[in-house]
Amino acid sequence: MQSYAINSENQKVESKELQMQANTVYSFFNSILIDELLTLKDHIIYADENALSEGKKPYFIGEQLILGDALILGRNGMEDVDVSISEEELSSLVNFDIPQFYKDTLTLLVNTEINLYKTFTLQKDEESVTLNPEWILYAFNMADERTKEYFLEHLQKTINTKEDINQYLQKMAGLALNAGSK
């Protein structure tokens, strides 16, 4: 099966021919903890769920934050298929230039149990909104420097006092969500 692998260390997109078996994706990452991201139309991005705690290098595919290596396959319904995006097109979407706010936040989150893609639901007016920690980083990265400093300072405090980091992040998501509606 035709696929692409992104190596976060050498910052390269590589074409890979895979023999798909039940454990192919798990073997690629040497782990059973895999995140499945559906950011690319008609494709699936597999990423190592342990990449944050292992301090792997971050990058973007489009606006999707990825940590560590990634494996990209085509997707037809629930079935993995050959990729249909060209290597050049995929390479143009990959960006290793990470804003300092992301780097600082990810450094603080390394020793936590946070999964950047695990969703939670907040209420905004009468509507339920599903978000994840990755969205929080995206939202606060757009804020002014003082707001970023506030976020980082209080995240560090939450970690130091061993308070619930998920609760802190959900609180920050609520602030960001409400700030966007004003």
Image (cartoon, rainbow, N blue to C red):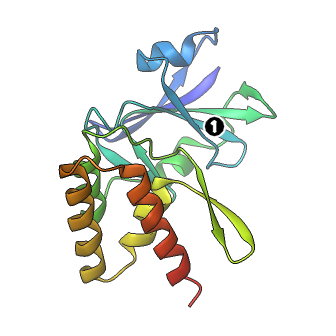
Q: Residue at x 29, y 69 (%)?
A: 151
Q: Amino acid at mark 1?
A: Ile
Residue in front for this viewpoint, 84 or 118: 118
Residue in front for this viewpoint, 153 or 15: 153
In this rendering, position of residue 27 left or right of residue 110: right
In this rendering, position of residue 98 left or right of residue 87: left
Residue in front for this viewpoint, 169 or 1: 169
In this rendering, position of residue 145 left or right of residue 125: left
Q: Is residue 99 visible?
A: no
Query: Residue lying farthest left?
Result: 160
Query: Residue lying farthest bottom?
Result: 182
Question: Where does the N terminus fall, quadrant-wise?
Answer: top right
In this rendering, position of residue 157 left or right of residue 34: left
Vertical side of 38 occupied by 121: above or below: below
Give the percent coordinates (x, y) of residue 9. Answer: 27, 36
Q: Residue at x 67, y 40 (%)?
A: 43
Provide the residue designation for mark 1: 44
Vertical side of 152 occupied by 162: above or below: above
Vertical side of 32 occupied by 110: above or below: below
Q: Residue at x 47, y 75 (%)?
A: 175
Q: Is residue 148 visible?
A: yes
Give the percent coordinates (x, y) of residue 128. Answer: 71, 64
Secondary structure beneath dot 1 equals strand
Vertical side of 81 occupied by 154: above or below: below
Q: How many marks?
A: 1
Badge 1 crowding class, 10 Å Cα cut-off, few under 14, some 14 to 19, many 20 or more, is many
Question: Where does the C terminus fall, quadrant-wise?
Answer: bottom right
Q: Residue at x 63, y 37 (%)?
A: 44
Give the percent coordinates (x, y) of residue 52. Answer: 33, 39
Give the percent coordinates (x, y) of residue 17. Answer: 56, 19
Residue 21 falls in image quadrant = top right
